[in-house]
Image: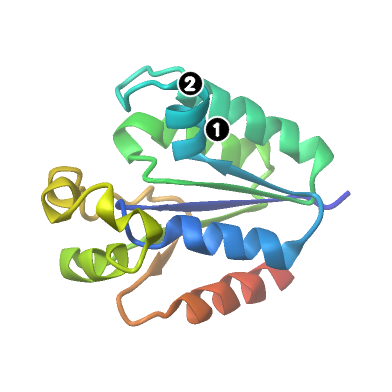
Amino acid sequence: MEFKLIILRGNSGSGKTTIAKSLQDHLGQGTLLVSQDVVRRDMLKVHDRDGNPSIDLIRQIAEYGKDNCEFVIVEGILMKQRYGDMLNNLIQFYEQKAYTYYFDLSFEETVTRHYTRSQKMEFGEDSLLAWWHPNDFLGVEGEVLITNDMSQDDILKQILKELQK
């Protein structure tokens, strides 16, 4: 079975989860979506701190996916300082068959996108600013930057095109 790892990272509200769900829908059956928020907040109910158990669980779920799924999507803020080693290890585990994207949006664009989400009332601009970590690039070969001028459709098309290579 051909297997591919897709990593979507960036600040809160930038559109990662929307793209991840669209990708999963498009790629279809056998596509595993590992969401940092689901693992950390829903499954484990832990804060995003160094050494939190969600880091290892995300890794374990993604590793399971290599032998059981054609595509594994790992998405979340996934700050380099906290999750970088784990993500780099996953890229190695996937034998470099990894596609890494960083949502490199301005704060203003992130706020605009946040207010189009269903969770827009759960937190506002002050929280987005408190969580803001710009330029948090993973720094791996082939990391693609998603920018302000790219629509959701543009992003989805670009990722799907790159998966064909």
**Could you say which quadrant of the image residue 20 lies in?**
bottom right
Alpha carbon separation for disc pair 2 and 1: 22 Å
Q: In the rendered structure, are the residues bearing label 2 and label 1 in contact, judged by CB atoms less than 8 Å apart?
A: no
Image spot of residue 74 (x, y percent): 55, 45
According to the picture, the residue beneath numbered tag 1 turns out to be: 89
Image spot of residue 139 (x, y percent): 38, 50
Q: Is residue 88 shown above or below 122?
A: above
- Looking at the picture, tell me which residue is in the foreground, 89 or 147: 147
Residue 113 shows in the view = yes
Does residue 24 appear left or right of residue 109 in this picture? right
Indicate the secondary structure of the residue bearing disc 2.
Answer: helix
Label ID, residue 33: none
According to the picture, the residue beneath numbered tag 2 turns out to be: 44
- Looking at the picture, tell me which residue is in the foreground, 157 or 113: 113
Q: Amino acid at mark 2?
A: Leu
- Looking at the picture, tell me which residue is in the foreground, 31 or 2: 31
- Looking at the picture, tell me which residue is in the foreground, 12 or 163: 12
Does residue 84 appear left or right of residue 28 in this picture? left
Which of the two labelled residues, at mark 2 and mark 1, occupies the earlier sequence position?
A: 2
Q: Is residue 49 shown above or below 148?
A: above
The residue drawn where x is 25% and y is 64% is 110
**Could you say which quadrant of the image residue 161 lies in?**
bottom right
Q: Report crowding for label 2: few under 14, some 14 to 19, many 20 or more residues within 10 A (C-alpha).
A: some
* Colour scheme of the rendered structure: rainbow
Q: Amino acid at mark 1?
A: Asn
Image spot of residue 88 (x, y percent): 50, 38
Q: Looking at the rendering, in which quadrant would you find the C terminus?
A: bottom right
